[in-house]
Image: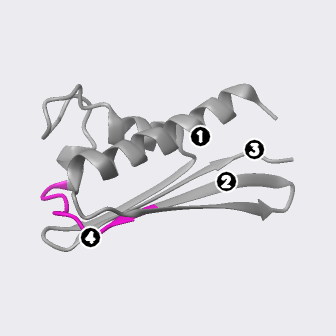
Amino acid sequence: MRNISIHAFATIISELAYNLVFHTDQGGTIKIRTLKDGERNGIEVICEDPGPGIEDTELALQDGYSTGGGLGGGLPGVRRLANEFEITSTPGVGTRIRALRWDLVK
């Protein structure tokens, strides 16, 4: 295992969990599963919430943009740390984020 990959995955989980606490009072879920693709091993995380949603996901993914007065590095950081990243959000309905990091599990 590569330590940097483990730390990257831990940071992904931490950022997504913080967003669930900070941005929605309705709760949410984080699902984690291991994946295998040939010789590659990875861990996928899916974070979903029925919260307020994100008005402009492209803006939310820009470094320095924050709706809560923070540094604005959470979602952009998750996207950088993940090998695969997807986000879908509908205002008033909720948000789903999928992040996958390869080469974590042996």
Q: Earlier in the sequence, mark 2 or mark 4?
A: 2
Give the crowd class for mark 2: few <14, some 14-19, many >=20 residues within 10 Å: some
Give the crowd class for mark 1: few <14, some 14-19, many >=20 residues within 10 Å: many
Q: CA distance from mark 2 to mark 3?
A: 8 Å
Depth-wise, is mark 3 or mark 4 nearer the camera?
4
Foreground of the two, 39 or 32: 32
Residue 55 lies, in percent from the top left, at 12, 59
Can you tell which quarter of the image residue 65 is in? top left
Depth-wise, is mark 1 or mark 3 nearer the camera?
1
Callouts 2 and 1 close, C-beta under 8 Å: yes
Region of the chain picked out in magenta, as a range? 47-56
Report which residue position mark 3 lands on: 103
Give the label on residue 43, or none: 2
Report which residue position mark 1 lands on: 9
Callouts 2 and 4 close, C-beta under 8 Å: no
- Which three-letter amino acid code belongs to the residue tagged 3? Asp
Callouts 1 and 4 close, C-beta under 8 Å: no
